[in-house]
Image (spheres, rainbow, N blue to C red):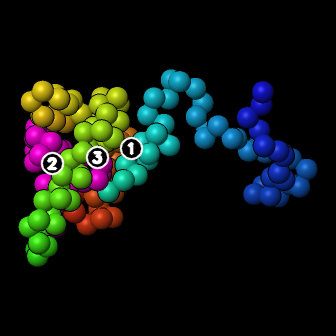
Amino acid sequence: MSNDVGVVPDIAHGSDTADCRIRTDGGASDDRDRDGVDQLLDLLATHRRRHALYYLRELEVATVDEVARLVTEKPGSTAESADIDARIEETKLALKHVDLPKLTARDIVEYDRRSGTVRYRQPSARLTTLLDSCAELEETPFTTD
């Protein structure tokens, strides 16, 4: 089965007879491209995962509780204590059941469920570049110079 959608003119090169195939497989060439851009962007698609990685990159090792608190609390926030505690619990559950399994599967973090410890591993240069770009766009204190 072909991954082509159809034929479109090669307008960029001034030809209306040359064709260009449009891929429908997300642009991945094969399984060798383990750090495909689509997969990396998927990992960084949520605020919670990006900010967890910003903090873990700086701290290297932290507990899930610490990461949840750092991701949830905003500097200078005056939110009610009960409200912030509930949000931290929600964040902690999401980290444990969604985010950390995704990051662990890609060898970006190590997560020890028994101790609740998360260790940042050295990810690929491509992920580091994307994470740096996101940190800069979000104007976090965790941009690297």
Badge 2, how many Cα within 10 Å: few under 14, some, many 20+? many
- Toward the right, the furthest residue is 17
From this view, report whether residue 42 is shown above or below residue 137: above
At x 69%, y 41%, the residue is 24
Residue 55, visible in the rendered structure: no
At x 78%, y 27%, the residue is 1
Q: Amino acid at mark 2?
A: Val
Task: Please state the extent of the stretch shown in magenta in the rendering.
Answer: 48-74
The Cα atoms of the two marked residues, 3 and 1, are separated by 14 Å
Give the label, 2 or 1, closer to the camera: 2
> For the residue labelled by badge 1, is the local secondary structure a helix, a strand or a loop?
helix
Q: Given contact means CB atoms under 8 Å apart, are the residues at marks 2 and 1 in contact?
A: no
Say which residue label 1 marks: 43
The Cα atoms of the two marked residues, 2 and 1, are separated by 17 Å
Q: Amino acid at mark 3?
A: Ala
Say which residue label 2 marks: 67
Give the label, 3 or 2, closer to the camera: 3
Q: Amino acid at mark 1?
A: Leu
In the image, taking residue 132 as reference, residue 71 lies left or right, namely: left
In the image, taking residue 38 as reference, residue 12 lies left or right, namely: right
In the image, taking residue 46 as reference, residue 91 lies left or right, namely: left
Say which residue label 3 marks: 94
> For the residue labelled by badge 2, is the local secondary structure a helix, a strand or a loop?
helix
Badge 3, how many Cα within 10 Å: few under 14, some, many 20+? some
